[in-house]
Amino acid sequence: MTDLSRASAPDDGIARRTILAGAAWSIPVIATAATAPVAAASAALTLTFDKAVYTGTACSTITGAYVTVTNGGVPVSNAPITVNLTGDYTFSDGTTSFSGASDGTGRMNVAPVKVPNNGGTAGILASTGSSASASTLSAVSNGVSWCLPGTATPYVTPKVPTGSKVIGWNVRVSPANDLWVDQTNITATYGMAKVDPNNVITAFDNNTSRTTFNDTAGVSWCVDGTGAPIQTPNVPVGSKVIGYNVRVSPTNDLWVDQTNITATYGMAKVDPDNAIADLYNNTAYTTFNDTTGASWLVTGTGTPYKTPKLPTGSRVIGWNARISPTNDLWVDQTNITAAHGMAKVDPDNAFSTLSGTGSYTTFNDTTGVSWCVVGTGTPYATPKVPTGSKVIGWNVRVSPANDLWVDQTNITALNAMAEVDPDNAVAAFYNNNAYVTFNTLTAC
């Protein structure tokens, strides 16, 4: 989703002048909107959308939007305006750009906007000359929730609200920001505050979904399965969730459970965008970079240790697995790319998870070919998987045609399913099986 600055709403009234013509006894007073032609504008023009957010529903049309052009508060006529859309939103003719000019009131009506089946948040941007303004488009998808253990038959979770955000195995956050585990609304059941959908992670361990989340006040919680959530009171408010019961505080300290690892061991601060925690047998396994770019590992609340061979500034993708700045895959102290003479790795399509004592890594090379590697072993290709597929878990991908692939099986085709929402599909890995949670989208 694209975060865009939101334009403020326009003034309620339009600047007007009162014109008195002739004698007061012969002609009534008439109020007329004064406009300046665009050629007469001397200062930078101001563009304003009539709303900060335009809300729609999947496969519907957003209508009635308009942009107003002013110069020093005076409406400007005949100003050429171009409006562009981001994301998957389009205008009625299927394009993402619309042009027109302001009328005598300084206003230009925007063409109807078609909402895609995956909804989401996107931008609507208006410009004239060097002036610009932005607003937001928002809609809930028509996504239906499914679960798939291994390559078995997928099944629907009917109670989960349409358009919910997939977090992990059988865990979602609804459009109303309620936490759902399986068919249970945890938020409603336990009378909790709403969930921050950008600060919630689920691990699948010992056949149980284990979820860590913040509520909208920034308070940290954990819940095992559909049990009662437990607060973690020592953790600073507003910390970033990076795994089960593992967070990075607003001051970039690493917290595991109730322990401040950074302070306890006198470490440098943590890079919050390069820290991931896995869970195995009730123990957190955390891989992170400090703010100098050095790589570290910590098991539970034990002493962190460095992985010295790794290039500084490598990107963390899972337990003891990283992508270097030159796009080599490193597992532990081994450069997998160099060791096996492979093509470079696509850093946006690489995922590693912990099972047993080893890392299981799925990645694409820069040609879009899919690979798997266990630990520091020899990578192997998965040739049936379409080139350019999106990696969502160990040996699980969504193809460019939005089919779900588990290993060499096209689950979508096998079960004659609707297309998968690639932004709402997550695979966990447990006991050598993939556990996939995903949404399907109904075509408009």
Image: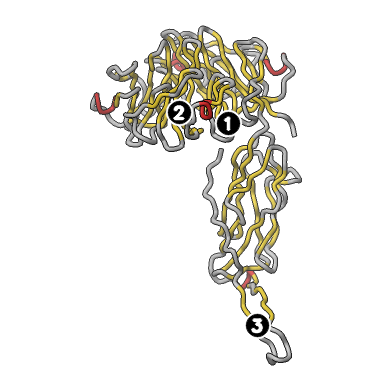
Q: Quadrant of residue 389?
A: top right
Q: Neighbour class for label 1 at 10 Å: few (<14), some, many (≥20)?
A: many
The residue labelled by disc 2 is 213
Which residue occupies 63% across, 10% down? Answer: 151
**Residue at 61% over, 63% down:** 69
| Up/down of 140 relative to 301, above or below | below
Q: Quickly name the residue at label 3.
A: 19
Q: Secondary structure at mark 2?
A: strand
Type of amino acid at the residue the image marks with label 3: Ile
Quadrant the C terminus occupies: top right
**Dot 2 crowding, Cα within 10 Å, few <14, some 14–19, many 20+:** many
Q: Amino acid at mark 2?
A: Phe
Give percent across and percent down for residue 51: 60, 53
Residue 316 at least partly seen? no
Q: Residue at x 69, y 43 (%)?
A: 90
Label whose residue precedes the other's in the sequence (3 or 2): 3
Above/below status of 12 relative to 396: below
User: Is the N terminus in the top left, top right, bottom left or bottom right quadrant?
Assistant: top right
Can residue 301 be seen by looking at this rendering? yes
Measuring from the top left, give residue 50's x and y in whole percent. 62, 56
- Mark 3, residues whose alpha carbon is within 10 Å: few (<14), some, or many (≥20)? few
Residue type, mark 1 in image: Ser
Residue at which label 1 appears: 174
The local secondary structure at tag 3 comes to: strand
Q: How many marks?
A: 3
For the residue pair 130 and 435, the one nearer the viewer reads as 435
